[in-house]
Image (cartoon, helix red, strand yellow):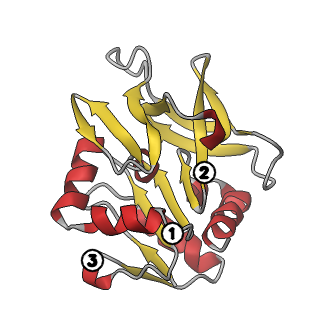
Amino acid sequence: MIQVIPISGHSNTQSVLAALEAVGLSYSIVDSPSAFSTLQPVLIPGLGRFVDGIRYLEQTELSGVIREHGGLKSPMVGICLGMQLLFSSGSEGITAAGLGIFAGEIKPFPNHAARGGGLNIGWGEVRWNGGTPSSLNQAYFSHSFRASDVSPGDILAESVHNAERFPSAVQKNGVVGLQFHPELSGAAGIALLKNFLTL
């Protein structure tokens, strides 16, 4: 059973749930600590602002159980905003503390203030470090912020936007962050998501 924690009002939940169903994974929606189990894998999909996402997790008191789960070496995957919230902090208008599972800060791409200058929307190459864990070499992105100052040992894959290399996948123990959307990246993307959730 996959525990899905959608970030309220900012989530790509439906496409993620459809992807889980396509590969035969059952799931439950978790919106409170009482519904959370440290024995089951966790999936955090999300779209939107860092500060709004972390505020939701703090208000629902889910931030604490997510941090605890992150230290148990149990499978947990964050997608897009869900990945970004796993980092130490995010700067989007104001700086907010994140979940701190990964060291690093979420910052805008250069030229973010210019119209469309920092947007990375569409298909892009995924370059896996230390060998490709799947056949996914092209993935769908939709973001304008990226992780910076990330520990090299945590970087699982990198991609390039406007000539800047950025981490598109990170991993520490059983926790994985994916800046791209595996659920929108074809059969290879969905298979990759299943693999990370069933490690």
Whether residues under marks 1 and 3 lie with C-beta atoms below 8 angstroms apart, the answer is no
Disc 2 to disc 1, how far (Cα)?
A: 14 Å
Label 2 vs 1, first from the N-terminus: 1
Amino acid of disc 2: Gln
**Mark 2 crowdedness (10 Å alpha carbons): few <14, some 14-19, many ≥20:** some
Q: Position of residue 52 (x, y in %)?
A: 22, 48
Where is residue 28, by image quadrant?
Answer: bottom left
**Residue tagged 3:** 33
Q: Which residue is mark 1?
A: 72
Query: In the picture, which quadrant includes the C terminus?
Result: bottom right
At x 56%, y 49%, the residue is 178
Vertical placement of residue 152 versus 15, above or below? above
Q: How many marks?
A: 3
Q: Point out the residue furthest to the left here.
A: 59
Q: Please, is residue 1 above or below residue 125 in the view?
A: below
Mark 1, Cα crowd under 10 Å, few <14 / some 14-19 / many 20+, is some
Q: Secondary structure at mark 3?
A: helix
Q: Earlier in the sequence, mark 2 or mark 3?
A: 3
Classify residue 122 by image quadrant. Answer: top right
Identify the residue position indicated by label 2 in the image: 171
Alpha-carbon span between mark 2 and mark 3: 24 Å
Which residue is painted at 54% across and 41% down in the image?
141
Q: Please tell me in which quadrant of the rendered image residue 134 appears.
A: bottom right
Amino acid of disc 1:
Leu
Residue 97 visible here: yes
The relative height of residue 193 versus residue 1 in the rendered view (above or below) is above
- Give the number of the disc on residue 12: none
Task: Say what secondary structure mark 1 lies in.
Answer: loop
x, y percent for residue 188: 73, 59
Q: Secondary structure at mark 2?
A: strand
